[in-house]
Image: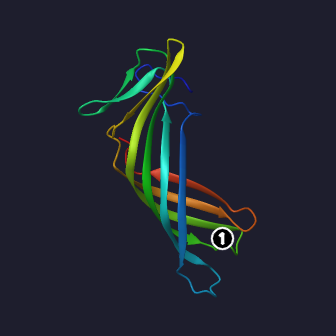
Amino acid sequence: NGERPDDALYYLRFWGCRYLATKLMGEIRLSRPDARTKLFLKTGIGVSWYNFMLEGDVRAERQEERVVFTPADQDLIKSKLNASYLNLPLMLQLGDEEENIFALSVGGYAGVRLGSYTRVVYREGGSRVKDKERADFFLSNLRYGLRTELNIGRKWGVTLFGNYDLNPVF
């Protein structure tokens, strides 16, 4: 319903959260070159960034044993938690992107956390103040999950993808 529950520790801004990634991929042919059905092993390396935008005047703080989402002392313009990961995908691809209009890939990925930080922005005395804190915030150092891609090849060169993390964020 879009409303924040009263007992929620934090609430994410739907339109403010982002996932960005870049990767280099390669294919290893598993089927014969003259086979009607083309099958490839697709793998590579990539970097991804999670950008969790927190709703309201709440900030993420690292305490001794856990991360705590606490109300801020001032009105916040922005409050976010970022994490970056180095990722290794491994998928089976059915179809050839260069020969076919579509190619479907299904598999998984694993990643290791490169870094994380929080950033809050607020006004103080008429000017904008930005506080940034680098820490692990008890985010998972390793991430892994399922990945699927639909490559729309030849003319368009577009890839639609979906990731599903199997491990918890914290």
Residue drawn at x 54%, y 30% as measured from the top left: 13
Q: Position of residue 147 (x, y in %)?
A: 50, 58
Residue at the far right: name it. Answer: 155
Image quadrant where one finds the C terminus: top left
Disc 1: which residue = 97
In-front residue for pair 86/134: 134
Residue drawn at x 56%, y 70% as measured from the top left: 93
Q: Position of residue 130 (x, y in %)?
A: 47, 26
Colour treatment of the image: rainbow
Q: Position of residue 152 (x, y in %)?
A: 69, 63
Query: Which picture quadrant has residue 38?
Result: bottom right
Say few, some or many: other residues with alpha carbon within 10 Å of mark 1 (under 14 / 14 to 19 / 20 or more).
some
In-front residue for pair 150/50: 50
As drawn, 73 above or below 121: above
As drawn, 170 above or below 120: below
The mark total stands at 1
Residue drawn at x 49%, y 68% as measured from the top left: 43
Q: Callout 1: helix, strand or loop?
A: loop
Residue drawn at x 24%, y 34% as measured from the top left: 65
Q: Position of residue 35 (x, y in %)?
A: 62, 85
As drawn, 157 above or below 34: above
Image quadrant where one finds the N terminus: top right
